[in-house]
Image: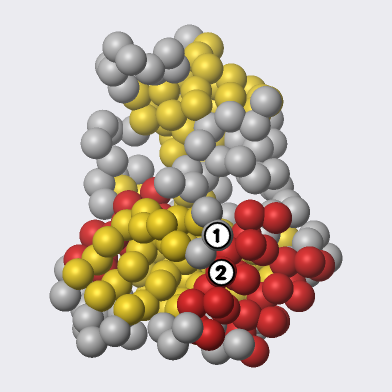
Amino acid sequence: MKFPSPLVPAILVRRYKRFLADCVLDDGREVTAHCANPGSMMGLAVPGTKIWLEPNDDPRKKLKFGWRLVDHQNGHFTGVDTSIPNRALRAALQAHEVGGLNDYHTVRAEVKYGENSRIDFLLEGDGLTYVEVKSVTLSRQPGLAEFPDSVTARGTKHLGELATMVGQGHRAVMLYLVQRTDCDRFDLARDIDPTYGAAFDAARAAGVEVMVLGARISPDGITVGAPLASLA
């Protein structure tokens, strides 16, 4: 998935109100960017960090920049926009490029199911497969990506919904897309949200499958990468 508009570099001044970030462009202008990430962004929103913004000229948007990447300045990047994993994964699913999820003739997004929920992807083939996607950006140890970075009641609910689908005879997959190029392993941050950890264990015991995929990230775009080892 290529970014619709070329990204521009900036320096983060501060992130606030969850969805706003003040930044300084290379030409010295200070701008406010939309931050499409409801999580804590632990370790990623440090003032002075080099980041990449996507400009837009959409008259319907109040903010003319969106925060897309953190540049670790060592050849590695983190994608901070939580909407991008679904867009990148949809393209990969439609191209039959995701191992274990490539034997389906129809990919449907945001389908209603369960108790007032929407599944990220419903795959249709010989049967139905429900795929929930989570963006992973937290890393507190070198090489190890973790989820979640804050308490997520919504994420806990999704695990329960997936287990219910398995109980109804369907296949269900919890897919974690790691939006960091500096990690090759994944685990749950059980200390941050023990309730989510317990729900994960219950869902897996009920038959929910777990997949962890990496991502290829650059200022040009983000695509789905190879599977990563899971310690969860």
The C terminus: image quadrant: bottom right
Residue 9 in view here: no
Q: Secondary structure at mark 1?
A: loop
Q: Residues within 10 Å of mark 1 (few under 14, many from 20)?
A: few
Q: Quadrant of residue 126?
A: bottom left
Q: CA distance from mark 2 to mark 1?
A: 8 Å
Residue type (three-letter) at the residue carrying disc 2? Glu
- Residue for point 78% across, 66% down: 195
- One can see residue 147 in this view: yes
Q: Quadrant of residue 153?
A: bottom right
From this view, report whether residue 117 is shown above or below residue 54.
below
Give the vertical position of 50 relative to 130 (above or below).
above
Q: Indicate the secondary structure of the residue bearing disc 2.
A: helix
Which is more toward the observer, 63 or 228?
Answer: 63
Viewer-proximal residue among 225 and 121: 121
Q: Does residue 83 sit above or below 227 in this rendering?
A: above
**On screen, residue 35 above or below 122:** above
Whichever of callouts 2 and 1 sits on the residue coming sooner in the sequence is 1
The residue labelled by disc 1 is: 115
Q: Amino acid at mark 1?
A: Glu
Which x, y percent locates residue 45? 65, 37
Q: Residue at x 43, y 46 (%)?
A: 83
Q: Which residue is mark 2?
A: 161
> Residue at the location (56% across, 41% down)?
37
Q: Are marks 2 and 1 in contact (CB under 8 Å)?
A: yes
